[in-house]
Image (cartoon, rainbow, N blue to C red):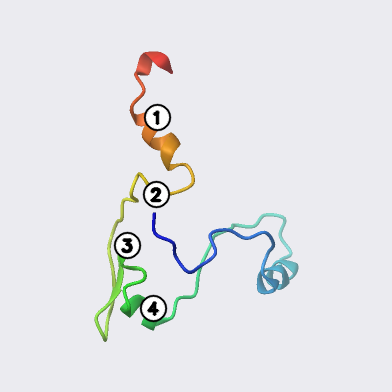
């Protein structure tokens, strides 16, 4: 499995997120994860595996990317589950 040069999880909220949450008056909040990516990193191919490329003047985004079933925290469980007989579930 490739090792990427970014954090895979957070143990605490970044200060900018904490400050933004303090400004919200509602009790309901929609949460999403985002990442600021320098164009050069995309041009270098670091994000090609998720369909982000840059050809020098345009950002290209693939419509849909199916993750590799052998990569990720729960990959072994996912692969194992696809081999189970429905009768064993």
How crowded is the residue under tag 1: few (<14 C-alpha within 10 Å), some, or many (20+)? Answer: few
In the rendered view, would you say 19 is above or below 74?
A: below
Q: Nearer the viewer, residue 55 or 79?
A: 79
Which circle's residue, 2 or 1, is located before the other in the chain? 2
Discs 3/2, front: 2
Residue 86 on image: x %, y %: 36, 18
Q: Secondary structure at mark 3?
A: helix
In the image, which disc is placed on residue 81? 1
Q: Measuring 29% from the left and 73% from the top, which residue is drawn there?
A: 53
Using the image as rendered, state which of residue 35 and residue 69 is in the foreground.
Answer: 69
Q: Which of the two labelled residues, at mark 1 and mark 3, occupies the earlier sequence position? A: 3
Q: Residue at x 35, y 76 (%)?
A: 42
Secondary structure of residue under mark 4: helix
Q: CA distance from mark 1 to mark 3?
A: 24 Å
Point 34% across, 62% down: residue: 50
Which of the pair 10/4 is nearer the observer? 4
Q: Earlier in the sequence, mark 1 or mark 4?
A: 4
Please name the residue shown 33% across and 49% down the image.
68
Q: Secondary structure at mark 2?
A: loop
Q: How many marks?
A: 4
Judging by the rendered image, the residue that carries numbered circle 4 is 41
> Distance between the Cα atoms at labels 4 and 3?
13 Å
């Amino acid at each position: 499995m490739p090792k990427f040069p970014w954090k895979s999880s957070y143990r605490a909220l970044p200060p900018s997120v904490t400050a933004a949450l303090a400004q919200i008056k509602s009790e309901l909040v929609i949460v999403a994860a985002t990442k600021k990516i320098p164009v050069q990193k995309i041009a270098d191919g670091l994000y090609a595996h998720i369909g982000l490329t840059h050809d020098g003047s345009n950002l290209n985004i693939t419509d849909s990317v199916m993750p590799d079933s052998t990569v990720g925290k729960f990959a072994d469980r996912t692969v194992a589950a696809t081999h189970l007989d429905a009768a064993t579930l």
